[in-house]
Structure formats: C-alpha cells, structure tokens
Image: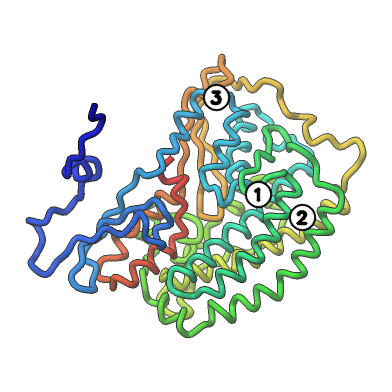
C-alpha cells in the first residue's frame, strides 16, 4: 500500500515563493538562502532575488520550528510554563525566566515585596547569561564572515559561564531556576568567590577581543557602512536591544522601567556612534554588544559586593518562602516586559480569576521584529554582505517561530 506519493509541486504549495519566475527580469535569479545555510543558523529560509552579486529583494520565510509556546502555555499552570519560557531564547534562558516571572508576580501583587537577596541573585544570573548570549552573538558573527579564532576564544570563555550556571542549577542551557515568588535554590557556597575569579580572568580577555575583532581592519571592512539601519526605521519596525541602540537610540528597559534592583546599580547604555562607518551599520551593532559585555561585568561586580556584604547568606534565608503553592490571580489583562540580550521580551497575560491556567499568554519576541527589518536594509547590498547583515541581527529562531 502506498502511503505517500511524491509530487513535485508539494514543496511549492507548502512554502510558496513571493516572487515568480515569470515576473523576473532576464538577468535576475531567485536564490533560496537556507534553512541549511550557516548564517541562517538552522531554520530560517530567505528568498533572495539577485541581479548578479546585487540583492534586489529579500523575503524571510518562517515556520521551521513550530515551537507552539503560546498554545502550550494556555494549557499549563503558571509555574509549569517556566521550562517552556526557557526554550524561547534558549541562549538567554535566565533573562527570559526573569521577564516572565516578574509578570506573574505583578498579577499576584508580589512586585517589590521579595527579599533583596533574591533580587540581586536574579540580576546576577541574568547578567551572567547576558554575557553568555553576547559571546555566542559575537563569536558566531565572526564565524559567519570568516573569522574563526574569535569564535573559539569566546566559546572557551562561555564554557566558564556555562559551568557556573550548571553548578547553580544543574543544567547548562535551560535552567528553570527563577521561580514565581523566589528561586529554586540559594547560591552554592563559594559561588560568589568563583564568580569574582571569573570576572578577574575575563577583563583582560575582553581587551584581547577588541584587538582581535572590533579593531581588526578586515572585520571593519566587512561590517562598516554595511546594512545601515536608520534610527527612525528601527523605531517604526519595533526593533529593540542592540539593534536599536546600534542605530543611536539610548534606550534600555533596565533604565527605562527600572525593574528589580537595576535602579540601585551603576551602568551605562552603549549606543552606536558611527566610529568606523555610519551610525546603525553592522559594525555598530556588534560593537554595542561588546560594550554591553563590559557593562554586564560592572553589574555583576556590584551584585557580588551586595551578596557578600549587606545581603549575604544567612542560615534562615529561604529562597522559596514566598513561592505560592497555587497561582490563581484576579481577572485582568497585563503586559510586562524586560531587557533581554536581544531586545525587549514582553508577555501579555489574560486571566479569568478562577483558574491557575492563563486564558491567553502572548509572547512579544524581539528577534521577530529585528528579523523583519532585513529586507529593508538589504536591498542593493552585495550578496556576501547579506550574510553580514543577517548575522548582525543576532537572531534566535526559538522565539521567532514560537
């Protein structure tokens, strides 16, 4: 019995192109960039219309993961959704957990009522994860345009971060550590000292990274004046994070919304200034991420000082003391957001006041908005520069095709 009969038109029907061959000029071609191409990181397909080496148009095609996060969330209790949140931006799971948990705590009127030690630990692990995320962004970006050494160096240093977080949570990427009303567990004994050792090790490495990548003549030639994103266009498309700040807008939700203990910490907001080319180009976006690593190091140091002095561990500290046994918030609509390594991650909650399962949970993914700008800034670019433009966006498809 024949269960499946191959039909050549199946692919065309399932994933149709926007452009048709009959509409092309004689010198134009339709290229399928991905989903297997390295710069598309696995699951993004770009329909590219090219005129020789020039890009005429780009059409992103989504739909290769089908993570179904939002539908899963509407059939699970609030606390059981956290492991699914980890899998949105799986390179910054702690940051995603932090954003989601703060939203549920607003629903329960727990905002601002947690012990300061819990808040400082949350910020500490979120900034460690921000470093790990940016290391992947900068390292793989170098890989996309042919710089292999930077990738190896950053993966080496990211491994130290992964081991710290594994010591803390038992997992290397998907943590389920930040809980509604608290934490899964307090910091292990000696964790603060190990973090301090790592930061002291990392500071000179960041200087080496600048010399190897950011100040490298070949890297500058490949990224400066390429993929220029004007500030007004970035705002209109809803871009956030380093993509928006790379275009010169000084906005960071850690400062704007002042959530958790960020208002008590001293750090700057790096923006693109067009030092090597034009404001908003690929070089600026990458440079902003490098500068943000330096700011995360400053935040981590301040958290460690607080956690070893004013808010040091005590025998009676219980990180689960305020964790509710049953989460049943009042009927309301609520939107909450936080500054993830890639931009604004937001959650819209709708509750009915009766159930411990949300009626609606919508995720506002920063990578989706950052991806949507690619066609606008790629037209007229060289085909090789398209790879540099995609990589400069630091996309994670887990939160795009959610």
Among the 4 quarters of the image, the one containing residue 265:
bottom right
The C terminus: image quadrant: top left
Work out whether mark 2 precedes mark 3 in sequence or the reverse, and give the earlier one: 3
Q: Residue furthest front?
A: 1
Among the 4 quarters of the image, the one containing residue 371:
bottom left
Q: What distance separates the C-alpha of mark 2 from that of mark 3?
A: 33 Å
Residue 165 placement, left or right of 317: left
In this view of the protein, can residue 236 be seen by the observer? no
Report the number of numbered marks: 3
Confirm or deny contact between disc 3 and disc 1 (CB under 8 A): no
Work out whether mark 3 precedes mark 1 in sequence or the reverse, and give the earlier one: 3
Vertical relation: 269 (above or below) 19: below
Closest to the observer, 285 or 265: 285
Vertical relation: 7 (above or below) 160: above
Tell me the crowding category of disc 3: few under 14, some 14 to 19, or many 20 or more residues within 10 angstroms, Cα based.
few
Q: Residue furthest bottom?
A: 217
Q: What distance separates the C-alpha of mark 1 from that of mark 2?
A: 22 Å
Secondary structure, mark 3, is: loop
Q: Residue at x 83, y 34 (%)?
A: 318
Secondary structure, mark 2, is: helix
Confirm or deny contact between disc 1 and disc 2 (CB under 8 A): no
Question: Mark 3 sits on what residue?
Answer: 76
Vertical relation: 353 (above or below) 47: above
Secondary structure, mark 1, is: loop
Residue 317 placement, left or right of 65: right
Residue 81 position in % (x across, y down): 57, 31
Q: Residue at x 37, y 73 (%)?
A: 226
Residue 129 position in % (x across, y down): 64, 54
The mark lying in front, picked from 3 and 1, is: 1
Question: Mark 2 sits on what residue?
Answer: 303
Give the label on residue 172, or none: 1
């Amino acid at each position: 019995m024949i269960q499946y009969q191959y039909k050549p038109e199946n692919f065309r029907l399932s994933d149709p192109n926007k452009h048709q061959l009959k509409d092309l000029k004689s010198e134009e071609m339709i290229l399928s960039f991905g989903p297997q191409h390295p710069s598309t990181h696995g699951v993004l397909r770009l329909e590219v219309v090219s005129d020789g080496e020039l890009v005429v148009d780009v059409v992103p095609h989504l739909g290769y993961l089908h993570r179904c996060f939002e539908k899963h969330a509407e059939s699970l209790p609030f606390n059981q959704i956290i492991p699914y949140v980890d899998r949105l931006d799986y390179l910054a799971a702690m940051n995603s957990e932090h954003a989601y948990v703060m939203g549920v705590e607003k629903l329960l009127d727990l905002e601002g009522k947690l012990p300061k030690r819990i808040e400082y630990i949350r910020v500490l692990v979120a900034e460690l994860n921000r470093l790990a995320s940016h290391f992947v962004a900068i390292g793989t970006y170098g890989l996309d345009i042919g710089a292999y050494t930077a990738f190896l160096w950053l993966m080496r240093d990211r491994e130290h971060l992964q081991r710290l977080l594994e010591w803390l949570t038992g997992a290397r990427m998907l943590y389920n550590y930040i809980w509604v009303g608290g934490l899964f567990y307090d910091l292990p004994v000696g964790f603060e000292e190990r973090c301090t050792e790592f930061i002291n090790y990392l500071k000179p490495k960041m200087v080496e990274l600048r010399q190897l990548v950011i100040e490298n003549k070949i890297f500058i030639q490949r990224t400066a004046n390429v993929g220029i994103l004007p500030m007004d266009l970035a705002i209109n498309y809803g871009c956030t994070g380093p993509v928006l700040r790379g275009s010169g807008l000084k906005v960071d939700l850690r400062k704007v919304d002042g959530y958790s203990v960020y208002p008590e910490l001293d750090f700057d907001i790096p923006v693109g200034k067009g030092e090597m080319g034009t404001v908003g180009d690929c070089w600026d976006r990458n440079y902003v991420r490098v500068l943000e690593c330096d700011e995360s190091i400053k935040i981590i140091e301040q958290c460690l000082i607080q956690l070893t002095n004013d808010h040091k561990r005590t025998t009676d500290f219980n990180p689960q003391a305020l964790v509710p046994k049953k989460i049943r918030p009042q009927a309301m609509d609520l939107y909450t957001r936080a500054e993830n390594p890639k931009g604004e991650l937001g959650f819209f909650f709708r509750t009915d006041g009766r159930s411990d399962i949300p009626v609606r949970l919508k995720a506002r993914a920063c990578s989706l908005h950052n991806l949507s700008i690619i066609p606008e800034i790629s037209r007229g670019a060289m085909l090789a520069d398209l790879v540099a433009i995609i990589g400069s966006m630091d996309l994670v498809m887990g939160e795009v095709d959610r």
